[in-house]
Amino acid sequence: MGKRLFINIKELYGILPLEVTRLQGEMMDRVESLPNAYLLVEEGKIAAFGKMENLSLDEMKGVEVVDLTGKRVMPAFCDSHTHIVYAKSREQEFMDKIAGLSYEEIAKRGGGILNSADVLRNTSEDELYRISCERLEEMMEKGTGAMEIKSGYGLNLESEMKMLRVIKRMKESYPILIKSTFLGAHAVGREYVGRQQEYVDMVCREMIPAVAAESLADYVDVFCDKGFFDVPQTAQILSAAAKYGIRPKIHANELDVSGGVQVGVDYGAVSVDHLERTTEVEMKYLKGSSTMPVMLPGASFFLGMPYGNAKEFIKSGLAVALASDYNPGSSPSGDMRFVWALGCIKMHLTPNQAFNAVTINGAYAMGVADKVGSITVGKEAKLIVTKEIPSLGFIPYCHHTPFIERVII
Ligand code: NIG
Ligand code: FE
């Protein structure tokens, strides 16, 4: 890999000390930057950066130099919530949705997650890997440098394991940083319809030990929401995973105020996600916890749901991360620049607040803030080099004008 020196960077954004792993409250509006900067990459890590006037080129003999005159550099996006391992898109449901059916109505008719599970069970592991990698590569091209990927379209032991093995293979084959999450409790598998508690017992008794035995999951997730899994079932699953040291990331409050935030915080969740319907009660509960609230504006956009109240969270001193939720049912896009733009346009975050929500706070929400999410010496050099754009705020503002010159991962 060797050394590479980027010089004449118009402005370098997202500089943080290593000990800052998330930005909360007022701090979320700050983006530390350096105009006219250089950045040295060594063996894939950020080795040094600073002002051009302090760079001594003599010391850089033999180093590959890349002139970035006019271009800006920021950390690559950190997408802490995705479901990109699925077998087939669901645009037939898109028609139902356009005709006015809600997400829950589509799910009740056997569409939704169960529909994806039927197809995935009949797709080979190799084919599933191939299709999923196409999505991963598209996301990398769009500037994502770290991401979390969930299972949850298998809903039986064999197919959940298949999904997690695909994620493992992706981890091993791509330079992007990937964390995997076991989401066996995404919906009740077809064989168990009407026997939900038996399904939950099976998840705890069979799936979690099998997943842990092969170290296939960094985290465990439960869709704790109206019509899916309730708080006691969620607690049961989280406690079964805790025996193997697997921490939670929770789907909560997408369809209703579910109690998922509280049970997540109680079990030391890294993040609680969705939060479209969160009230002051949950905000109080999150205060002082180590759990990152994650909002998914792409799902709000696609399903016409309310947006998470990120401004109130930040006003009360909390942090917020934004993620894509890339999945075939509620958010068929992994474009984090679009998520950044929705954060500004629909959630009224400033470009700086939303920038921090899609970089350092996203990294925190998947437990990798010590490795990615900011310009920090020692962190992995996962970077976006922009075209010659007028400012950082231009990126979410001109929300579909191409802005990436190249992505370094
Ligand atoms: O995050 N909410 C649950 N899971 C996904 C949707 C999954 C699907 O519809 O396939 C979500 O929105
Ligand atoms: Fe999701």
Image: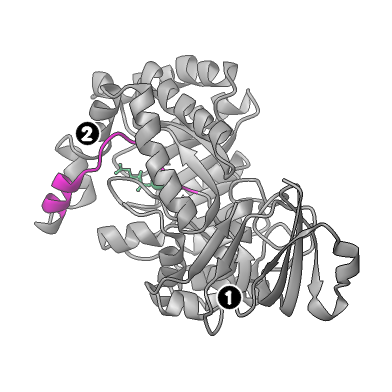
**In the rendered image, the vertical position of residue 155 relative to residue 267, given as above or below:** above
Mark 1 or mark 2, earlier in chain: 2
Residue 95 on the magenta span: yes
Which residue is drawn at the image coordinates 42% and 71% (left, top)? 402
Q: Quadrant of residue 38?
A: bottom right
Residue positioned most to the left = 99
**In the rendered image, the vertical position of residue 400 relative to residue 258, given as above or below:** below
Position of the N terminus, as image quadrant, is: top right
Residue positioned most to the front = 62
Q: In the displayed structure, does residue 313 sit left or right of residue 161?
A: right
Which residue is drawn at the image coordinates 33% and 65% (left, top)? 306
Task: Verify CB contact (< 8 Å) between mark 1 and mark 2.
Answer: no
Q: Quadrant of residue 119?
A: top left
What residue would you read off at disc 1? 352
Residue 82 on the magenta span: yes
Label annotation for residue 146: none
Provide the residue span drawn in magenta: 81-97
Q: What SS does tag 1 mark?
A: helix
- Identify the colour scheme used: one colour
What residue would you read off at disc 2? 115
Pinpoint residue 388: horizontal percent, then vertical percent: 53, 79
Pinpoint residue 152: horizontal percent, then vertical percent: 38, 32
Pinpoint residue 371: horizontal percent, then vertical percent: 70, 49
- One can see residue 406 in this view: yes
Q: Residues within 10 Å of mark 1 (few under 14, many from 20)?
A: some
Pinpoint residue 216: horizontal percent, then vertical percent: 55, 25
Q: Name the amino acid type tagged 2.
A: Asn
Q: CA distance from mark 1 to mark 2?
A: 39 Å
Residue in front for this viewpoint, 309 or 83: 83
Which residue is drawn at the image coordinates 79% and 58% (left, top)? 63
Q: Residues within 10 Å of mark 2 (few under 14, many from 20)?
A: some
Q: Name the amino acid type tagged 1.
A: Asn
